[in-house]
Image (cartoon, rainbow, N blue to C red):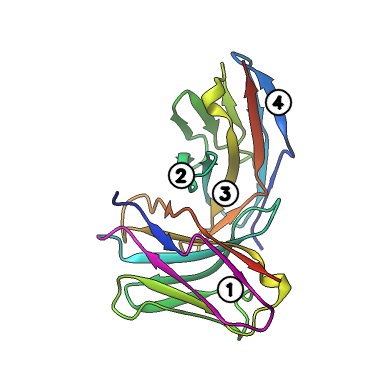
Amino acid sequence: GDSVTQMEGPVTLSEEAFLTINCTYTATGYPSLFWYVQYPGEGLQLLLKATKADDKGSNKGFEATYRKETTSFHLEKGSVQVSDSAVYFCALRGIWAGSYQLTFGKGTKLSVIP
Amino acid sequence: DTGVSQDPRHKITKRGQNVTFRCDPISEHNRLYWYRQTLGQGPEFLTYFQNEAQLEKSRLLSDRFSAERPKGSFSTLEIQRTEQGDSAMYLCASSLNRGTGELFFGEGSRLTVL
């Protein structure tokens, strides 16, 4: 079945540091890929997405590129801020028609210190 | 606030009791999802409704679990004869029946079974 493996945390960075959170997936065909973020005390919210190979999703300074050859969707940000402290989840949606079920990774907790 | 709302936010119960959670989706969204999240894990899909029809159920949804969406608006998730292993955060999400299929999550209902 479909699965997502993401880098284990927690990750602690200083403000303005470069961030990479690795995500790889196993799925049939060409799934859609997502990064969701959960800020403290809030629900999960979509950060960015990519629906086909070589697509780049971007939002709030974060980027991720859908790499079919390496089945990866790594999340990057050039300069993190304290407000980026949150738990980040990589997820995929399989190709089966009519299914909007998401398969999530375990999440990576990011703490950014001033 | 017009986001997804869930009630109660936290429920503590004794093993063997029944519990019910309610989810009110974003009003124009006709798709509704239930996920379960345990500590240190990503959300796991439980079930999905399109309007009032329950179209997908995970094998995680044992016979003790039942979900309804009687009028295609709010939904309830009932757990009968609770077990300690049911302790988790129960997440509800909703989406439109078109476009990106982005899921909008509520803040969750945390269940603690003593």
Residue A97 visible, this angle: no
**Span highlighted in magenta in the image:** B8-27
Left or right of residue A92, residue B3 in this image:
left
The disc label shown at residue A91, or none: 3
Q: Which residue is mark 1?
A: B58
Q: Nearer the viewer, residue B77 or A106?
A: B77
The disc label shown at residue A45, or none: 2
Q: CA distance from mark 3 to mark 1?
A: 17 Å
| Label 2 crowd (10 A; few <14 / some 14-19 / many >=20) | some
Q: Disc 2 vs disc 4: Cβ atoms closer than 8 Å?
A: no
Is B23 within the magenta?
yes
Q: Disc 1 vs disc 4: Cβ atoms closer than 8 Å?
A: no
A92 up-or-down from B69: above or below: above
Q: Quadrant of the N terminus of chain A?
A: bottom right
The chain holding disc 2 is: A
Measured as percent of width and height from the top left, residue B29 is found at 30, 61
Measured as percent of width and height from the top left, residue B82 is found at 65, 79
Query: Do circles 2 and 4 both sit on a common chain?
Result: yes
Nearest-to-viewer mark from 3 and 2: 2
Q: Under tag 4, what secondary structure?
A: strand
Q: CA distance from mark 2 to mark 4?
A: 21 Å
Q: Mark 2 is on which residue type?
A: Gln
Mark 3 and mark 4 lie on one chain; the one further toward the N terminus is 4
Nearest-to-viewer mark from 3 and 4: 4
Q: CA distance from mark 3 to mark 2?
A: 12 Å
